[in-house]
Amino acid sequence: MPFLPNQVSNMEDSIKPNLNGGKMNESIGTWLKTEVDKYLKGDGKYNGIVNIISDEDLLKFCYLSIKSNPGNMSEGAKRITLDGINEKWFSRASKDILSGKFDFTPTRRVMIPKPGKTETRLLSVGNPREKIIQKAILLILEQI
């Protein structure tokens, strides 16, 4: 069921991340560092971090961290926004990432005016729902 704007607090409670086996006493950074370290091999390379990226609770945390940014309400190439996101989307995205079926869509490109000039410049607008996955990747890379 999609979440309505007036149900934001209910939505946050219903998709609240359950990281660290339900123990939210650790910060996301500490939890991520512990998880990332599990995939560090003896040769200094990481193998299997896709399992962290596909974690539904991490995706929900990333959603909660980006949902209030005004730019994330801009439509991407598929003309969808963060409105109407639900539990099913997180489950499907997680499964697609794990199976290797997830694919980022091309960005929507628009020409916008340069500040104080008559010239324009190219602006690429990505799919806001894909920004959730990009945020998860960013958090993991910051820990590495």
Image (cartoon, rainbow, N blue to C red):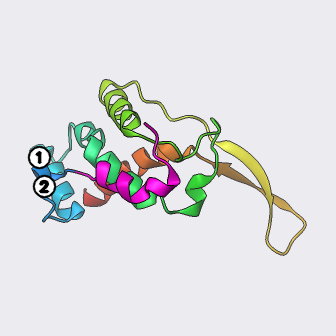
Q: What quarter of the picture does the N terminus occupy?
A: top left
Q: Amino acid at mark 2?
A: Thr
SS at badge 1: helix
The residue to which callout 1 is attached is 38
Residue at 11% in and 46% down: 38
Q: Magenta span has 87? A: no
Q: Residues within 10 Å of mark 2 (few under 14, many from 20)?
A: few
Residue at 25% in and 59% down: 143
The residue to which callout 2 is attached is 34
Total label count? 2
- Image quadrant assignment for residue 43: top left
Judge by depth and name the residue closer to the eye, 113 or 4.
4
Q: Magenta span has 13? A: yes
Residue at 9% in and 44% down: 42
Q: Can you give x and y, in whole percent of width and height, for residue 61 in the image?
A: 32, 54
Q: Can you give x and y, in whole percent of width and height, for residue 62 in the image?
A: 37, 53
Q: Is residue 142 above or below residue 38?
A: below
Q: Report if the CB atoms under discs 2 and 1 are less than 8 Å apart.
A: yes
On screen, residue 65 versus residue 130, left or right, reads left
